[in-house]
Image: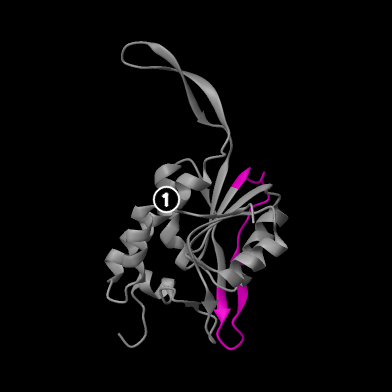
Amino acid sequence: MTNVNKIDHPLCEHLLGQLRRVETPPSQFRLVAHQLTQFLAIEATRSLATRQIEITTPVAKTEANEIAQRIGIFPILRAGLAMSDPLLDLIPSASVFHLGMYRDEATATPVEYYSKLDESQPVETAFIVDPMLATGGSALLAIDAVKRWGVKHISMLSLIASHDGVDTVVNAHPDVALYMCAIDPVLNANKYIVPGLGDAGDRVFNTIPNQ
């Protein structure tokens, strides 16, 4: 699967252990998610086009490069919000477009409730972000929405994916590049990634039930 990219780095593995631990508090969870997202972003932006410009340093004029395309960040609400700022830190000129989806707990299928992509010229490159790529249902809805808008170059960044989720997206959208820090083996009966890290949204926003 050419378009599937798993980050292989000792620091990434170290941070993943912290992210998965049930004892990790929300404040630390958010920090580690931020750090891991930047690992993903560095890899996912390797193919961005640049153009040459002239700048002036304190001692001379010289040539430099700048990003040559309009970039959009598409967080899948709500957990995807944890991955927006790390990308914006690296690409402050990017635009952010929110995609609202929730999982119907009775059927484990995604339901789209918000998507506001304006009628202006679409971005040239899209980074869809969601910490968990479980069944792949929300990812497919998000990719379909971004493609309908007219975006040609799409990548999806997730902290953890399942084999099922990866296969679902690759089969439906082989042109979309996937980046993740780990690919876990299975989904449980409730369609949660195992071993996973629980509900990323609850852990980011400190809304874990019965706590």
Give residue 19's position: percent from left, percent from top.
Answer: 35, 67
138 horizontally vs 24: left or right: right
Crowding at dot 1, Cα within 10 Å, few <14 / some 14-19 / many 20+, comes out as many
> Is residue 91 visible to the viewer in this orientation of the structure?
yes
Q: In this view, which residue lies farthest toward the top?
A: 60
Q: Is residue 114 magenta?
A: yes
**Which residue position is annotated with label 1?**
39
Give residue 70's position: percent from left, percent from top.
Answer: 58, 40
Give residue 195's position: percent from left, percent from top.
Answer: 44, 76
Which residue is at a point 50% across and 44% down the rendered structure image? 94
Q: Which of 24 and 16 is in front in this view?
A: 16
Which residue is at a point 70% across and 59% down the rendered structure image? 173
- Which type of secondary structure does the marked residue at label 1 adopt? helix
User: Which span of residues is magenta-colored?
Assistant: 102-125
Look at the picture and state if 105 lies above or below 90: below
Q: Does the magenta stretch include residue 120?
A: yes
Q: Nearer the viewer, residue 5 or 34?
A: 5
Q: Which amino acid does label 1 sit on?
A: Phe
Which residue is at a point 32% across and 76% down the rendered structure image? 22
Give residue 154's position: percent from left, percent from top.
Answer: 62, 51
Report the coloring of the rendering. Answer: one colour
> Is residue 141 visible to the viewer in this orientation of the structure?
no
Q: Which of 168 and 203 is in front in this view?
A: 168
Quadrant in the picture for residue 123: top right
Q: How many labels does the image show?
A: 1
Quadrant containing the C terminus is: bottom left
134 horizontally vs 124: left or right: left
Quadrant containing the N terminus is: bottom right
Look at the picture and state if 77 lies above or below 48: below
